[in-house]
Image: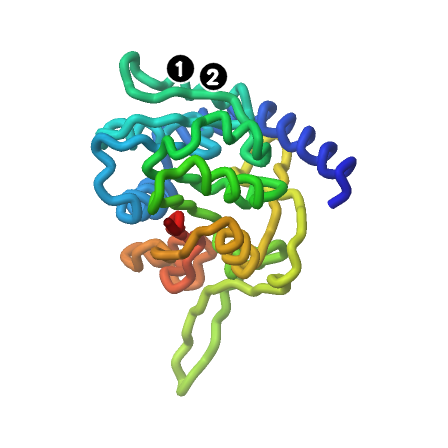
Amino acid sequence: MPEEDRTTVLSETRRIWDTIAEWWDDKIGDGNDFQQVLLEPTTERLLGDISGQVILDVGCGAGRFARRMAELGASVVAFDFSERFINRAQQRTPSGMPIEYQVADGTDYHRLLEFGESRFDHAVATMNLMDMIEIDPLFRALASLLKPNGHFICTIMHPCFQPPGMAKYAELSESDGKFIKQNGVKIPHYLTPIAYRGTGIVGQAETQYYFHRPLSIYMQTALAAGFVLDGLEEPSFPPANVKPGGLRWDDMPEIPPVLAMRFRRNG
């Protein structure tokens, strides 16, 4: 993307998130099914025991998972490039919790280095890499910010099952005289990276930017920065509450809406 276009999109992305930050935080409140069932348990498994460790929370939003990591015994440095999200995070965080909040841009390599070389045991990014116009600066910076063999755990919208143009479907078919209801997703686009506008939560005032990338780009970017992939999960909702022919993610236990990856700094 030309630098002029990048600057414009980056500025517009910040404006959008500052516009919807409070509404977004009010809507999520104390958490939703995605966070409580898919994201947080998966990230905690991939992190392991973090008691006494120092964690960098990339794109922390209103600080929900930063507070969770502090409850688990970690000291946390959490940043977001939306000042309004950081204000909400500070308001929601009890006094004395070992969390330091800062406003920073996750695509600004030099700004990220200010957090401190080899300072962090691990880093996490919860459902935001697909919101970032580029991810190479973050991975390169993390290679310096993390201690040797430190981990970066990230969760993203699964690019195989939630690319632009994805459509959920419900079908009724007949087989040997039996009628079968099926539900799933149809995928028209995957390999080509693309920026597009979409809705994270129904009802938000403005659509936000998404930056779709195939898995190969995530892997190539991480490997080029000196990371190796040593953990991967594809969490989906359990089948207990499936509605045949339904169009919710809860109705598709065989299709993971989220991809979780754990990268280790190699050396």
Q: Please, which residue is most extreme toward the top here?
A: 95
Q: Please give the name of the residue rendered at 48% of the width and 33% of the height, measured from the top-left corner.
A: 59
Whether residue 236 is visible here, answered yes or no, is no
Name the amino acid, label 1.
Gln
Q: How is the image coloured?
A: rainbow
Q: Label 2: which residue?
A: 87
To which residue does mark 1 refer? 91
Seen from the viewer's position, the closer of residues 8 and 138 is 138
Gap in angstroms between the C-alphas marked 1 and 2: 6 Å
Residue shown at the point (78%, 36%) measured from the top left? 4
Residue lying furthest bottom: 176
Q: Position of residue 182 (x, y in %)?
A: 44, 69
Task: Give the camera-side residue of 47 and 22.
Answer: 47
Number of marks drawn: 2
Q: Which mark is residue 38?
A: none
Q: Quadrant of residue 132?
A: top right
- Image quadrant occupied by the N terminus: top right
Q: Amino acid at mark 2?
A: Asn
Residue appearing at x 43%, y 40% in the figure:
126
Q: Quadrant of residue 108?
A: top right
User: Mark 1 near mark 2, Cβ–Cβ under 8 Å?
Assistant: yes
- Where is residue 14? Give x, y as percent: 62, 28
